[in-house]
Amino acid sequence: MSKCFCGKEIENWAYARNKIYSHVCSRFCAETLKRKLPYDYRRKIPVKCYSCDNTFELKSPYCHANQRFCGVKCLTKTMSCHKGKKYSFIFTTIYENPDGITSQDIYEACDKQPFRVKGARGVTIALRRWVARGIISIDKSTSQTLYRWTSDLRPGQELLRWSK
Ligand SMILES: [Zn+2]
Ligand SMILES: [Zn+2]
């Protein structure tokens, strides 16, 4: 098992909370790197809820390090959208990889999830509708086809918007 720069092991078992990152242990550490902050386990990183306009603080303890919603209410509301768990997860992998991510990488992240996706091709099919809606773009300018988040809204907000 590899280690994160913070010293923690990078868990990748099925129910580990961090399923998106393989180079760091958590969203907390990913944000620390992205914002070029020195690592401090006491740090509180303000982030926006993925489903509403509330701001909450990412913290290093396990149960707060991978948070995406301000609270249970937003989490429940988002997960109860049609295929909410699946799309919320796929959207998050794309949203948190601003340089773009391949369908294969999305599939590999999904493979550790309780829901099923049928290979990289299954990801491509699942995303078609969202590409057509203009939320996600496909970049074919390099040898790899990359998916990118293009919406100004966050993942949960898009799911809620289209579930109405
Ligand atoms: Zn870490
Ligand atoms: Zn919220």
Image (cartoon, rainbow, N blue to C red):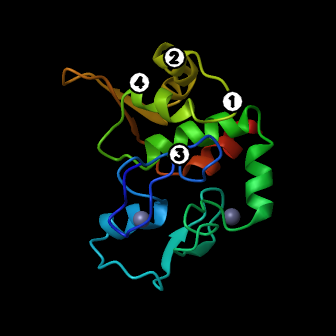
Q: Does dot 1 land on a helix, a strand or a loop? A: loop
Q: Nearer the viewer, residue 137 or 109?
A: 109
Which of the two discs, 2 and 4, labels the residue nearer the N terminus?
Answer: 4
Distance CA(mark 1)–CA(mark 2) = 12 Å
**What residue sits 57% from the left and 43% below the top?**
13
Distance CA(mark 1)–CA(mark 4) = 16 Å
Hey, what amino acid is under mark 4?
A: Gln
Residue 78 picture location, percent across and down: 73, 48
Question: Mark 3 sits on what residue?
Answer: 19
Mark drawn on residue 119: 2
Distance CA(mark 2)–CA(mark 4) = 7 Å
Neighbour tally class for label 1: few under 14, some 14-19, many 20 plus, Cα within 10 Å = few
Residue 83 picture location, percent across and down: 73, 32
Distance CA(mark 1)–CA(mark 3) = 13 Å
**What residue sits 30% from the left and 77% below the top?**
37
Which of the two discs, 3 and 2, labels the residue nearer the N terminus?
Answer: 3
**Does mark 4's beta carbon lie closer than 8 Å to ligand 1?**
no
Neighbour tally class for label 2: few under 14, some 14-19, many 20 plus, Cα within 10 Å = some
Which of the two discs, 1 and 4, labels the residue nearer the N terminus?
Answer: 4
Hey, what amino acid is under mark 1?
A: Phe
Q: On screen, 42 above or below 127?
A: below
Question: Mark 4 sits on what residue?
Answer: 104
**What residue sits 52% from the left and 45% below the top?**
12
Which residue reaches farthest bottom? 42
Quadrant hosting ligand 1: bottom left
Mark drawn on residue 115: 1
Residue 164 picture location, percent across and down: 77, 39
Distance CA(mark 3)–CA(mark 4) = 14 Å
Which of the two discs, 3 and 4, labels the residue nearer the N terminus?
Answer: 3
